[in-house]
Image (spheres, helix red, strand yellow):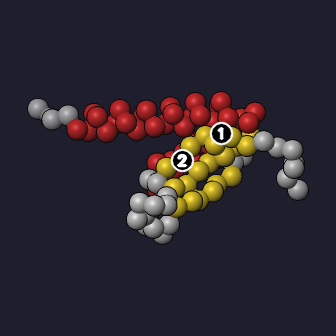
């Protein structure tokens, strides 16, 4: 049974399913427990089916570490994309 006094912190949110699954994977590999919520953007013609905004929440005590892991993975992915964009000689 979950702790009713547990405070959660949002550590990641995105409508990009690839980035979202990568963030989840990093937390799973690190053994950090998390909860996922999905909400649609409203007022802009977005559909909850087409453009859901997914959030990852962790216990406040794990938030700093979770953010570090996710940001590190995102930075590595971004630098990999930049390397692939460079012309080959």
**Residue 37: percent from left, percent from top:** 63, 56
Q: Residues within 10 Å of mark 2 (few under 14, many from 20)?
A: some
**Residue 72: percent from left, percent from top:** 50, 31
Residue at (72% x, 46% y) in the render: 33
- Comes first in the chain, label 2 or label 1: 2
Q: Quadrant of the C terminus?
A: top left
Q: Along the line of sight, which residue is nearer the eye, 2 or 53?
A: 53
The image shows residue 84, relative to residue 42, as above or below, that is above
* Separation (CA) of disc 2 from disc 1: 19 Å
**Residue 8 occupies which quadrant of the picture?**
top right
Residue at (45% x, 67% y) in the render: 47
Q: Is residue 24 left or right of residue 59?
A: left
Q: Quadrant of the N terminus?
A: bottom right
**Residue 26: percent from left, percent from top:** 58, 42
Q: Along the line of sight, which residue is nearer the eye, 31 or 89?
A: 31
Secondary structure at numbered mark 1? helix
Q: Is residue 84 left or right of residue 48?
A: left
Residue at (82% x, 43% y) in the render: 6
Secondary structure at numbered mark 2? strand
Residue beneath disc 2: 13
The image shows residue 41, relative to residue 27, as above or below, that is below
* Residue 19 in view in this figure: yes
Q: Is residue 3 left or right of residue 47?
A: right
Residue beneath disc 1: 30
């Amino acid at each position: 049974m979950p702790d009713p006094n547990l405070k959660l912190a949002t550590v990641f949110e995105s409508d990009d399913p690839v980035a979202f699954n990568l963030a989840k994977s990093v937390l799973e590999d690190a053994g950090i427990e998390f909860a996922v919520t999905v909400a649609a953007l409203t007022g802009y013609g977005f559909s909850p089916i087409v453009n859901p905004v997914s959030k990852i929440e962790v216990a406040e005590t794990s938030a700093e570490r979770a953010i570090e892991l996710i940001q590190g993975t995102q930075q590595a992915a971004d630098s990999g994309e930049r390397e692939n964009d460079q012309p080959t000689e």
